[in-house]
Image (cartoon, rainbow, N blue to C red):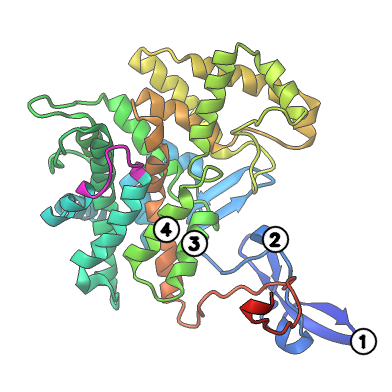
């Protein structure tokens, strides 16, 4: 028997079905609310709205749980790679050895850009932001792959997904090189996904950049931990744009634009800026926390819309940052400041009561700094990592044949009916 909730309005009782997820999370199905009661819901920020059913990622914010297709994030981080995670998210299961080998080979085969694409970079100024270039040029891929604008088979989807995941790192590296006035470095098919990206970023003609295994592993971990996170701003954007039957290139390009915001993909850059401000302002972390409580200092990297406990990704990244700095023989003053700030916050009743714990952005910037990734590239790195999740969500929306174009309602608060006044009488 279907469970229902009852809404009583103006003497009329409306039965609303209850939708249950596999972990017992429940939602009220309001799809008939407007037709039966003349009502819509008011939910600023969509904080209590579930626009879809999804089998991709599960988040339990109260208990600090994150799972990709049912697999705990700590197991994936410890044992998997980014390419393996991409396959899992997009196709639903961990790949076999043969599937992973073919997928990796396909990424190598698709890593080059059409030579004409390079001319797009010439249209950007030398100081153009890499995120602007990334979004525009990913969108332009639709001009070079007309056969994939309408995806009607699994084979076409597989090819489109491979092209985007492979080419996004090439576009990202070229965007960085353009902003630095450096010549483009072509991808090397003999290198792994992450090693190849670092090669395109930092090699120069006649001097090949060879990152350490620790650096490659840290980059793979960073991308893996950012690969998906349920219905966040950028993922919801991809699904909304895709609901109009926009092609995959255009949809993930819209996701890149949404990610650019400093409250989303730009948050880890904000953390680095905050730690630098503490360092240069010669304030102690405890002094900063007192200022934050008085609303006189913006504390970045703490708290999360979903997590009301320690972000599980932050736990993994904190450990990884320690290990990477140690193995590279580097010292980072910002890491020391961050640890002191975290320790002080977690012992302060103000932050404990409000459940303000470090999130994924708090330590991710430290890892990127250790890899010599400049701050302006931080959201680009996030976009590379999030690409498999975006693609998976776009396809899930695409396969939902009953899905309708997303069209939120509103509560109108403007002027009531008025008569037009000719310009001479105003």
Q: Which mark is residue 413?
A: none
Separation of disc 2 and disc 1 at Cα?
A: 27 Å
* Quadrant placement of the C terminus: bottom right
Q: Position of residue 331 (x, y in %)?
A: 42, 12
Q: Which residue is mark 3?
A: 237
**Classed neighbour count for the residue bearing mark 4: other residues with Cα under 10 Å, few (<14), some (14–19), many (≥20):** many
First in sequence, mark 3 or 2: give its number: 2
Q: Which mark is residue 44?
A: 2
Tell me the SS state at disc 3: helix
Instruction: Say which residue appears at 70% left-offset and 35% top-offset.
Output: 356
User: Image check: 188 left or right of 299?
Assistant: left
**Main secondary structure found in the magenta portion:** loop
Callout in the foreground (4, 3): 3
Callout in the foreground (1, 3): 3
Given residues 11 and 138, the one toward you in this image is 138
Range of magenta residues: 122-130
Q: Which residue is mark 1?
A: 11
Q: Position of residue 315 (x, y in %)?
A: 55, 32
| Total marks in image | 4
Instruction: Say which residue appears at 47% left-offset and 32% top-offset.
Output: 364
Separation of disc 1 and disc 3 at Cα?
A: 38 Å
Separation of disc 3 and disc 2 at Cα?
A: 16 Å
Separation of disc 2 and disc 4 at Cα?
A: 23 Å
Tell me the SS state at disc 1: loop
Q: Which residue is mark 4?
A: 390
Separation of disc 4 and disc 1 at Cα?
A: 44 Å
Q: Position of residue 304 (x, y in %)?
A: 64, 43
User: Where 229 sits versus 181, above or below?
Assistant: below
First in sequence, mark 1 or 3: give its number: 1
Callout in the foreground (2, 1): 2
């Amino acid at each position: 028997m279907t469970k229902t909730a009852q809404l009583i309005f103006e003497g009329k009782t409306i039965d609303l079905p209850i939708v249950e997820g596999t972990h017992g999370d429940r939602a009220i199905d309001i799809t008939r609310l407007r037709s039966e009661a003349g009502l819509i819901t008011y939910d600023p920020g969509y904080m209590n709205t579930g626009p879809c059913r999804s089998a991709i990622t599960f988040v339990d914010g109260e208990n600090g749980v994150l799972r990709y297709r049912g697999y705990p994030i700590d197991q994936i981080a410890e044992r998997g790679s980014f390419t393996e995670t991409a396959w899992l998210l997009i196709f639903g299961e961990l790949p076999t050895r043969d599937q992973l080998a073919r997928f990796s080979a396909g990424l190598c085969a698709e890593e080059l850009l059409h030579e004409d694409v390079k001319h797009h970079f010439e249209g950007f100024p030398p100081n153009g932001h890499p995120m602007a270039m990334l979004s525009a040029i990913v969108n332009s891929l639709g001009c070079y792959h007309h056969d994939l604008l309408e995806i009607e088979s699994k084979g076409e989807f597989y090819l489109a997904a491979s092209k985007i995941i492979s080419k996004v790192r090439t576009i990202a590296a070229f965007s960085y090189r353009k902003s630095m006035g450096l010549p483009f470095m072509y991808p090397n098919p003999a290198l792994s996904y992450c090693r190849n990206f670092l090669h395109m970023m930092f090699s120069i003609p006649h001097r090949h950049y060879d990152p350490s295994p620790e650096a490659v592993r840290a980059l793979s971990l960073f991308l893996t931990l950012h690969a998906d996170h349920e219905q966040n701003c950028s993922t919801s954007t991809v699904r909304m744009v895709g609901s109009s039957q926009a092609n995959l290139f255009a949809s993930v390009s819209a996701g890149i634009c949404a990610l650019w915001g400093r409250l989303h993909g730009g948050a880890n850059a904000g953390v680095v800026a905050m730690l630098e401000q503490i360092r240069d302002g010669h304030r102690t972390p405890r002094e900063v926390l007192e200022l934050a409580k008085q609303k006189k200092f913006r504390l970045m990297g703490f708290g999360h819309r979903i997590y009301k406990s320690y972000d599980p990704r932050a736990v993994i990244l904190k450990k990884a940052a320690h290990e990477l700095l140690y193995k590279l023989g580097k010292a980072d003053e910002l890491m020391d400041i961050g640890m002191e700030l975290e320790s002080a916050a977690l012992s302060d009743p103000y932050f404990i009561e409000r459940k303000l714990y470090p999130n994924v952005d708090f330590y991710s910037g430290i890892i990127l700094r250790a890899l010599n990734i400049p701050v302006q590239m931080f959201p680009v790195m996030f976009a590379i990592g999030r690409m498999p999740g975006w693609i998976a969500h776009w396809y899930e929306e695409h396969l939902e044949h009953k899905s309708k174009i997303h069209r939120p309602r509103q509560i109108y608060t403007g002027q009531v009916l008025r008569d037009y006044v000719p310009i001479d009488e105003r």
